[in-house]
Amino acid sequence: MHLSAGVAMGSSVVRPSTLLRGAALVATGAWLLLLGWLAATALFPGLRDSAPRFLAWLATPGSATAMTVALALAAASLGLLLASRPYDGVRVPFVLSAACAIAAGVLGLASYLPCAGSRPALWDAVADTLGLFLGGFEFPFGPGEACVHPAPLALHLARLLAIVATLSGAVSLLLTVSRAQLDRLGLLRARTVTLVVGLDDTSWPVVAGLAADRRGGRRCVLLVEDADPPLETRARAAGLLVLRTPAGDPLDLGSASLWRRVRRVHLLSGDSALNRARAAQLKDALADGSTVSGGATTLTLVARIDDPWHADDWTTSQIGDPHLVVDAIGTYEATASDLVERLRDLPPARVLLVGDTTLALAVCAELSQRGREDQFCDEDATPPVVTVVGPAANEVVADHRLRQHRFALDPLEVGAVDAEPDLATVVGLVRAAGPGTAVVITVAGTRLGGRLGVRFPDLPVFELSARDDVPPGAQPVVGQVVPFSLALTGADGRRGDAWERAARAVHDRYRRRFPGSPLAVAWEDLPREFYRESNRRQLHSVLDAMAALGRSWRPTSPEDVRFDPAQLACDEAGARIAEGSRLFDLSGPELERLAVAEHASWLAHYRADGWEYGATRDDPARRHPLLRPWADLPPEARERTRVGVIDTLVQLRALGYRPVRTGAEAWARFERLGGVEAEPLTAPLAWTAPTGERLTAPAGSWLVTDATGGRRTVTDESFRATHEQLADGTWRRAGTVRARLARDAEEVATQEGTTIAVPGSWLVEDADGHRWLVPPDHFTATYRRVG
């Protein structure tokens, strides 16, 4: 867990200006010259008689003014030296003690050496000088003493500096010994805590970014198991609190004073297996109630898992835990995020990914996710067409499609060229692709980038370097060839997790739908962190509210009914609410509960920041007209909240997460059994459902009679998709559907009209999203659960 000084300091401390360093150099030089002059006049008192008046005055014995000038120059020198170097609070007393001790030793020896008399000159002078640090003060000056001249100014100054050195040394020792206790006291002043466990050179920039954010009483705490003074010193210099954990408890789960403030946990060890094990330990502690979370409904847990496949497997396995919202970060995905950000600045119509590597797979995944976010935010941006070049390029494309299958859609068009990515092959592909092409080389040490840069000076090329220390945002080296290294952060030094990105997307959607709002600005331009936190809060509020409705969060799967978020791109709020309720299986009362819970969360967030009700909105005065109970809100405000809930659910779905019912209300897959008689309708038909509702089937629909004598109508599209005609003219029911027990009095919008569920009936949904109700006896006879 060693950190190089250059990385630690350069990432966390603002470098002093050249002017400050110059002033420190001048002041230190002046002090050293004065120190030398005082020491010389102490050794040879006669020097003052032949020196210029000003220099003689500076060494005048007993002069209070000369003493003040010397002390002021020493203080200025030391102060500027400390300001020009990145020392933390604990090291200042040590530096002060060392500087004063050296100066006192030089001046003391120079003062006592000429006054040894018959004693051993050097050792007696050393003993008398050491006595200054212990409070002793030998005075062999004046008539009848070893030195008949007055005590030099150097000795008085040495005596004072020795006292300062002793006191500051004691303070330095006290702070060093008790720094862990001081950090625990600092923890008490924190409102919320971000925990960091595991730290190395690669993850340091992530931690530096976390530590720099102290808004709202936030503090970043590094947990260490064993003493590592260099690491602890550098971490504290960056603004972290450092706590040593008890043996066998690397997360310090037994500390209630710590965990009641924890809101985020970052497991950043380079060993992903260790991070997963610590995550499991935390999950178990939260489940059995042994870890206090201070009333927070969920903790955000971010683990470093570099391999994208392992990261996918781990994150999806954690979904549904009511205590944790999880995300994984890794060098491949973070590097891919930075590369895609640079590509979007161009932007190219085509991208050649050279190499069938893990990084190539990560770049494809990032381009797909950006495309989903653009669609969610109603943007017209189209992802570039991607071609992967390598001996196993088709395998990379197959892996990408498999990974993306769990999402609602994949907007990325990806192709493959199974060939060795040598110069001739890549040059041919670049020429065939034409203008608007960019190349990303994901294999290190090929020298391909420079050779492409010579041949195509205007071609954007991003090349993985064989070095691991290429700074983010490096400039082109040949033509437009930009080198890069694998890293956990991008050119801006920070990388948001998946939930941060989701919060951004929710805000971007809001500002496009409500352009007249005072907060309809870019994420980075929001006037306060408070507003960004409100978007993060909205995600967690919906997660918790859906859990309260009996939903469990699960990863999407190929068997899920898939949908295109573009279906929700309509501007009319009522249509968006109706379509979203259908897609997420929400009844009217359930959506209302979600909206009420979201408004209550929003209300608490604003009131905690000091906001109050006001007839008109006034951000500087923290007044808002909607800071009142749900029942008192105007209809348009309530509708806007419902739309916000639907939008948040869509974004969670785009991340690959879906809410499913638990227990008796959970959806399951069923296959259809038996045969029916059917005839097409040549004219519209009105009929009465078993529950009493009057329904109307349009011409072209089918009138279906099953084996029990029950009759119903089915649209032509749905009928042909779910029935097969037999030789005798009858039809056999075919295919599979999703079904669950309907809730009592649940309203279901069918293709023929709205029906009301009776106790025991089943709600059935086909692959196209069409729904209908089936009486319990008929369902038992004609449907069989798959598996």
Image (cartoon, rainbow, N blue to C red):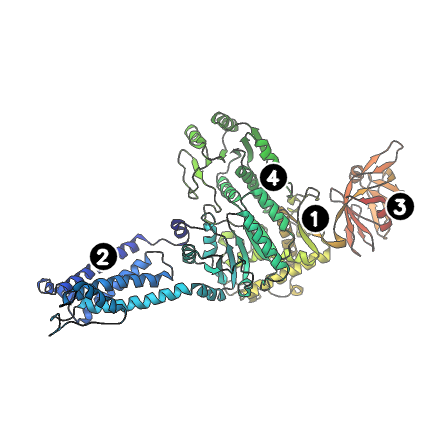
- Residue ID for mark 4: 411
Residue bearing mark 3:
710
| Amino acid at dot 4 | Pro
State whether residue 62 is above or below residue 391.
Answer: below
User: What kind of residue is marked 1?
Assistant: Leu
Instruction: Give the Cα separation between the discs numbered 1 and 4.
Output: 20 Å
* Mark 3 or 4, nearer chain start: 4
Residue bearing the label numbered 1: 583
Q: Position of residue 497 (x, y in %)?
A: 54, 50
Position of residue 23 in the picture relative to residue 723 (left or right): left
The picture places residue 422, in percent across and down from the top left corner, at 49, 27
Label whose residue precedes the other's in the sequence (2 or 4): 2
Q: CA distance from mark 3 to mark 2?
A: 103 Å
Q: Nearer the viewer, residue 554 or 408?
A: 554
Mark 3, residues whose alpha carbon is within 10 Å: few (<14), some, or many (≥20)? few
Label 3 with label 1: CB-CB less than 8 Å? no
Asked which secondary structure carries label 2, the reply is helix
Q: How packed is label 1: few (under 14 Cα within 10 Å), some, or many (20 or more)?
A: some
**In the drawing, does residue 274 fall left or right of residue 660?**
left
- 279 vs 174, left or right, is right
